[in-house]
Image (cartoon, rainbow, N blue to C red):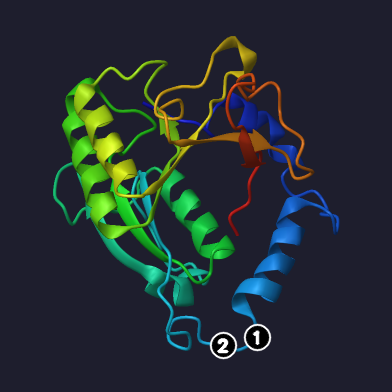
Amino acid sequence: MLFFDEDDRNEVLKSNRFQVRSKHDFSTRMGRFVQRHILRAAGVNILTDYPHKRVKVAIIDTGFCANDDPFFINAERRIRNCRSFIGKETDWEDIHGHGTHVARLVLRHAPECEVYVAKISDTRSFSEDQVGQLAKALEWAGEQADIINLSFGLGQLCPFPCLKEVLDKLMLSCKLIFAAAFNSGGNRSRPWLANHLGVFCIHATNECAVPNLNMNPIAKSSTDNFATLGENIQSY
């Protein structure tokens, strides 16, 4: 397994990370959308003032770490449950950073959702003998959440029937599952889990909604192709 936003390419592009944003880029437009349509009014307590059911998002990744970041003073209350599927269940601390980065993005851009964190790795990869833990993490996420985020892949074909069975059960339960496309451009096709029937495969764009051909696999003409900001993302 590989988490897909961490290759040498991002290291090269760090010098452009703090570029001045325009009023038309994704982050700026998303910020306006959140203020206008989600928060609805300044000063609203988004945790208690609306009685409707909140969307629940599960992030299966490297865990979560809040530290003393001011961003989490209020947002951390929306992290409803965390669990590790490697080692102790309570050891969900993120020592890698990828899972925390993903969680921050969800907390920032979906300020009324509740977040559930499943830790499946301490590094950007894991071995085949940990597949059972991933299957358990998927089952747990399905019990907790409406949406499941998977920012990784396991090769071109599903090598493990137990994982396919779990995914199929989740989709029969009307869970929405999102998985990353890839980082190897047109040289490789969509990986599994993203190529599994019913999973939303998400391609990457830059701030101006332009797909990066050096990252994304070739779009498929026979099915849907979804994309969102996925290059040099700031989660703060």
Is disc 2 in contact with disc 1, using a CB cutoff of under 8 Å?
A: yes
Residue 136: % across, % down: 19, 42
Pick the residue in front: 80 or 220: 220
Residue 154: % across, % down: 37, 23
Pick the residue in front: 23 or 64: 23
- Identify the element where label 1 is drawn: loop
Query: How many callouts does the rendering have?
Result: 2
Residue 48: % across, % down: 43, 86
In this view, 132 is above or below 188: below
Tell me the kind of residue under disc 1.
Ala
Identify the residue shown where x is 35% and y is 44%.
62
Tell me the kind of residue under disc 2.
Val
The C terminus: image quadrant: bottom right
Q: CA distance from mark 2 to mark 1?
A: 6 Å
Q: Is residue 129 left or right of residue 20?
A: left
- Identify the element where label 2 is drawn: loop
Pick the residue in front: 142 or 235: 142
Tell me the residue that label 1 is attached to.
41
The N terminus: image quadrant: top left
* Observer able to see residue 19: yes
Most extreme residue toward the left is: 88
Q: Quadrant of residue 202?
A: top right
* Observer able to see residue 97: no
In this view, 155 is above or below 84: above
Tell me the residue that label 2 is attached to.
44
CA neighbours of label 1 inside 10 A, class few (<14), some (14 to 19), many (20+):
few
Q: Quadrant of residue 187?
A: top right
Q: Is residue 182 left or right of residue 134?
A: right
